[in-house]
Image (cartoon, rainbow, N blue to C red):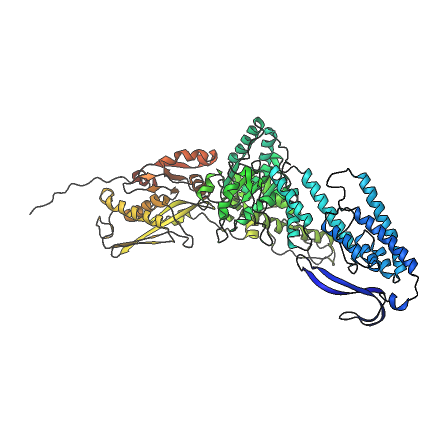
Amino acid sequence: RIGTAALAVQVVGSNWPKPHYTLLVTGLCRFQILQLLKEKPYPVAEVEQLDRLEQFTNQHKSEEELGELSEQFYKYAVQLVEMLDMSVPAVAKLRRLLDNLPREALPDILTSIIRTSNQEKLQILDAVRLEERFKMTIPLLVRQIEGLKLLQKTRKPKQDDDKRVVAIRPNRRISHIPSTTEDEEEEDDHDDVVMLEKKIRTSSMSEQALKVCLKEIKRLKKMPQSMPEYALTRNYLELMVELPWNKSTKDRLEIRAARILLDNDHYAMEKLKKRVLEYLAVRQLKNNLKGPILCFVGPPGVGKTSVGRSIAKTLGREFHRIALGGVCDQSDIRGHRRTYVGSMPGRIINGLKTVGVNNPVFLLDEVDKLGKSLQGDPAAALLEVLDPEQNHSFTDHYLNVAFDLSQVLFIATANTTATIPPALLDRMEIIQVPGYTQEEKIEIAHRHLIPKQLEQHGLTPQQIQIPQVTTLDIITRYTREAGVRSLDRKLGAICRAVAVKVVEGQHKETKPDRAEVGEGEDCKEHVTEDTKTESISDTADLALPPEMPILIDFHALKDILGPPMYEMEVSERLSQPGVAIGLAWTPLGGEIMFVEASRMDGEGQLTLTGQLGDVMKESAHLAISWLRSNAKRYQLTNASGSFDLLDNTDIHLHFPAGAVTKDGPSAGVTIVTCLASLFSGRLVCSDVAMTGEITLRGLVLPVGGIKDKVLAAHRAGLKRIIIPRRNEKDLEEIAVNVRQDLTFVMASCLDEVLNAAFDGGFAVKPRVERLNSKL
């Protein structure tokens, strides 16, 4: 119950990152608590002053004994101070205090400076009598002197280090007595900093990074923990230690094993597999090969992301996916500078810290959907990451030192290259990933999708069977996509329906005494009824569980998935003149596109509807201009019999699916064929689709996306496709079985297009010579 009365001189501290305050006080005297008056909101007590009363209460005290003790104490104090470095200002000031202060104040001051435990400090505080205080403090001084002597003997002598302050803590007033837990925390933090420095020195970071880290660790040692920068600096140093500067995994370079692994994980995708095997082969011949920067471009659901994971598995590397869709801040790539509050490294450095090696496979997903905002352009920040000539010294704003990314295998995915900046596109190797054919989808479904869905729904092949004919019905009637995501969802719906039947069958087996009347069962279930009434108690037929395995046929599909979503309506929609089928490319894959035309009396206007872009509108004007200039040649007339097709006639061109924006030059030949059908009154062949750009002279120019367009026509059941002659080289990318099912017509001019689009051709009619009367 003995304490120290003091005056608060200064309060220093902050609330961040955690509340931490330092109180500077000046001690006055000791006191003893007589009575506690109240405890809240702060304690108030009646106290009695204890020390500094000797001159009033003990006038006849033995001055001799106290004089000897004080002299002995003074001698030990001078000896201790002289063992320290007098060039230090604090030590010189302490030496002057020994001579100037009264001897009665020396025990309190020296006890607060030398290394003692909290318990020993409290014992000195409890010693009210000066004689007792001197006797308790002298052994502590002697112990400190002996410790310094022993330490000086064991240390190597140095010129500037003989009298260095070693065991003396910073000067604290006697009134500031920290608790034992605070001392332990300080010691733990000190040990952590020492361990951090040891990790920095033993890490394999670059020379520049090591130099920066050592400089920061020196600042950290001198920095009080209450400063906000302490936590930031420590986090930075811990990140630098955790980064894999030279740690890497060993590649598996067996080409045969890699080919088997890729074939097991993915069906088709020959281009991708070929590129990975080429990388493995070159890697065997050259060890320090830089990682390639690939970009897989294709519609959704074709496996671009999953094949990236398979590539990492094939190479035996770590895999990390970075989703870039919607990212609009360049700091997500490069990180924030450490001057900002809450700064952190970018996604590239964070990914390297996560995987723990410097040669992972990084998948930059949806690189075509990067945004741009006031915070900068992340696509521009990626230029340094994806440039093989620059990424060996990639500098993150948070690290502020170069990091080598040349061993990282970057794989980007995109649905289209139209939204990727040209500078970024130039740094990547583009590999097109087209949509799947029907045959490929069937193989993928039975190799990968159906086993995965059975496992997810707890079913076995002994409980459900989905034949290939049923899979083909799902592909053609319930999905229309380039990938297999919708197909996967439909298979999941079938598995859920079968799971319900299986559970119901198990319930009936466990409770056979409950009679249930079978009401409209699906034809996939074979339910037998017991019609024999052997006893009066058998009042109803027992519904038995369905026979296993449950076979999924067309009728079961209709019950589970509903009526078919897509029908083969091509022939029905071509039942009148003025309709033709074109082929379009979208980021989701190829699509067939109907073009409809009609004419009516009017003032010669051309109306275009269907959310068309400027290029497609220009193609329509080109088509009508070419037909007007060649109307006499093909004997095309308007309703009044005039060769001027727009004379008192309005033409309306419509592209169905009006909610979808359409643009591009490839619909030119389709518009010409549609208008030729309208003005000639002839029907276009119902199994013909076409694509190609036209010119005013009637030439057919090449277009892009041929493979996706051909696959779309094949999915729709079309048999003949008209394409520009200069696109013939693109047919080599199409699978052989698809080419065998289709007939390709190569056209270099519109005459060839019209001859192929109509039954019996669209021959030029000979002119009939007429004599013009001059009368």
Q: Is residue 656 above or below residue 262?
A: below
Visible in this render: residue 303?
no
| Residue 174 picture location, percent across and down | 79, 59
Q: If the image is split into quadrants, where does the N terminus sit?
A: bottom right
Visible in this render: residue 648?
yes
| Residue 576 picture location, percent across and down | 34, 49
In front here: 114 or 625? 114
In front here: 133 or 384? 133
* Left or right of 625 on screen, residue 491: right
In front here: 9 or 196? 9
* Left or right of 272 on screen, residue 453: right
Q: Is residue 119 above or below residue 750?
A: below
In front here: 72 or 212? 72
- Residue drawn where x is 32% and y is 36% of the image: 748
Query: What is the residue that sits farthest to the bottom in this orientation?
Result: 37
Query: What is the residue that sits farthest to the top in this orientation?
Result: 285
